[in-house]
């Protein structure tokens, strides 16, 4: 039976170099990596990750925990993390905890403690002190995406600042009658995202001397369908309509655009709309947005973890603000008539 020693002899490399080359771990020159792979292919040798794990104590597997796989942001983070892990020769174990508290309990009190993963990425989950202490106790590095986790490294965006940026974009165009589509109360559970973005909106409005009307603050569930229903009420149920809408997510912005079309409103002549995300549908819809690079956040989380793992370093707690970008498209423009 062909073994790694045979591959080493065929390639003229050491066993250690062949192991690193085939596993994708450690520093190996491109030439040596290619020699190792060519020799392995000639001999029909496939590296056993089980044996490698027994020898190194590592699983070459990262656990990624998300609240849902149905929301665009979470799926985009997963895509970015998965691609980075694949390139590095790592497996991904996905834990979708959903809305069942028992699922969350099982993941953090059982599955992640079995040492089947080398590291953990928690997406948009505000972990309790008990959950954090249990993960830290098994000595697995943790990276959080979406908000601060005590004792862990975090990748996040400044939600208040980008909400102000989105609102100020509308104000600079000349809008003063601006509505806000925020998230429902249920979405305040982890990191209070809707409240934080609403706070940024209100600060920008107040700083500009623009009135924040309670009837122009509407809630939805971060979906196109939910926002469509909420926007129909906003645009069809009041004697005066806003000239612009800032939605706390791109999907809610898209729902708002679809509802506006039902009333014969033109985008952006009659109503400007801006969102936050960088959703794939944004380009198709001509949506102005704050792109938060969700895929990039997932990839950065992986690089942060593997940088520590592969170099034998302890991942120190750190708060990394991921860059965002205003992408201006056709859904926002100077108001045609501020007295809409």
Image: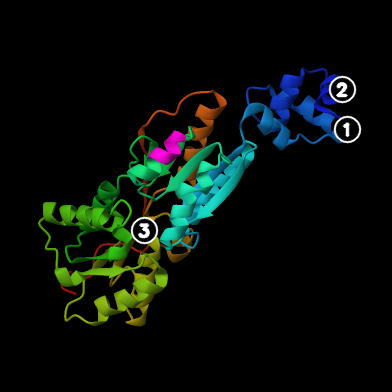
Closer to the observer: label 1 or label 3?
1
| Labels 3 and 2 touching (C-beta < 8 A) | no
Location of residue 174 by image quarter? bottom left
Where residue 39 sits in the image (x, y, percent)?
A: 84, 28
SS for callout 2: helix
SS for callout 3: strand
> Alpha-carbon neighbours of circle 3 within 10 Å: few (<14), some, or many (≥20)?
many
- In primary-sequence order, the first of circles 1 and 2 is 2
Q: Please say whether residue 232 is one of the residues in the magenta stretch.
A: no
Where residue 64 sits in the image (x, y, percent)?
A: 51, 47
**Is residue 169 visible to us here?**
no
Location of residue 134 by image quarter? top left
Closer to the observer: label 3 or label 2?
2
Report how many numbered discs are placed on residues in the image: 3
Judged by its main secondary structure, the magenta piece is: helix
Height in image: 316 above or below 65? above
Per the rendered image, the range of residues in magenta is 133-137
- Residue name at image x 85 percent, y 19 percent: 9
In the picture, the quarter occupied by the C terminus is: bottom left
> Alpha-carbon neighbours of circle 2 within 10 Å: few (<14), some, or many (≥20)?
some
Q: CA distance from mark 1 to mark 3?
A: 53 Å
- Residue name at image x 87 percent, y 30 percent: 2
- In primary-sequence order, the first of circles 1 and 3 is 1
- Residue name at image x 88 percent, y 32 percent: 43
Height in image: 116 above or below 213? above
| Labels 1 and 2 touching (C-beta < 8 A) | yes
Q: CA distance from mark 1 to mark 2?
A: 9 Å
- Residue name at image x 31 percent, y 79 percent: 232
| Residue pointed to by mark 2 | 10
Height in image: 9 above or below 102? above
Q: Which mark is residue 42?
A: 1
């Amino acid at each position: 039976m062909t073994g790694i020693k045979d591959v080493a002899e065929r390639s003229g490399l050491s066993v250690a170099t062949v192991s690193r080359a085939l596993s994708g771990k450690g520093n190996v020159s491109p030439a040596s990596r290619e020699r190792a792979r060519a020799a392995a292919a000639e001999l029909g040798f496939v590296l056993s990750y089980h044996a490698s794990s027994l020898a190194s104590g590592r699983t070459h597997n990262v656990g990624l925990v998300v609240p849902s796989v149905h929301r665009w942001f979470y799926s985009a983070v997963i895509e970015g993390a998965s691609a980075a892990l694949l390139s590095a020769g790592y497996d991904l174990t996905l834990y979708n905890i959903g809305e069942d508290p028992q699922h969350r309990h099982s993941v953090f009190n059982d599955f992640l403690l079995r040492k089947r993963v080398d590291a953990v990425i928690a997406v948009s989950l505000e972990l309790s002190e008990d959950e954090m202490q249990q993960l830290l106790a098994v000595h697995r590095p943790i990276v959080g995406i979406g908000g601060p986790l005590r004792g862990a490294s975090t990748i996040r965006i400044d939600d208040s600042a980008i909400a102000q940026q989105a609102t100020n974009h509308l104000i600079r165009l000349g809008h003063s009658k601006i509505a806000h589509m925020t998230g429902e109360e249920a979405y305040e559970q982890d990191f209070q995202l809707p409240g934080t973005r609403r706070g940024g909106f209100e600060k920008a409005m107040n700083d500009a001397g623009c009135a924040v009307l309670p009837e122009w603050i509407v809630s939805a569930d971060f979906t196109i369908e939910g926002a469509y229903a909420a926007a129909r009420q906003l645009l069809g149920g009041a004697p005066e309509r806003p000239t612009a809408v800032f939605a706390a997510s791109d999907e809610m912005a898209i729902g708002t655009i679809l509802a506006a079309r039902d009333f014969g409103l033109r985008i952006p002549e009659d109503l400007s709309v801006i969102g936050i995300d960088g959703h794939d549908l944004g380009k198709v819809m001509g949506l102005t947005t704050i792109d938060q690079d969700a895929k990039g956040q997932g990839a950065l989380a992986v690089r942060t973890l593997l940088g520590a793992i592969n170099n034998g370093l302890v991942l120190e707690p750190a708060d990394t603000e991921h860059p965002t970008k205003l992408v201006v498209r056709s859904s926002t423009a100077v108001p045609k008539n501020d007295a809409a």
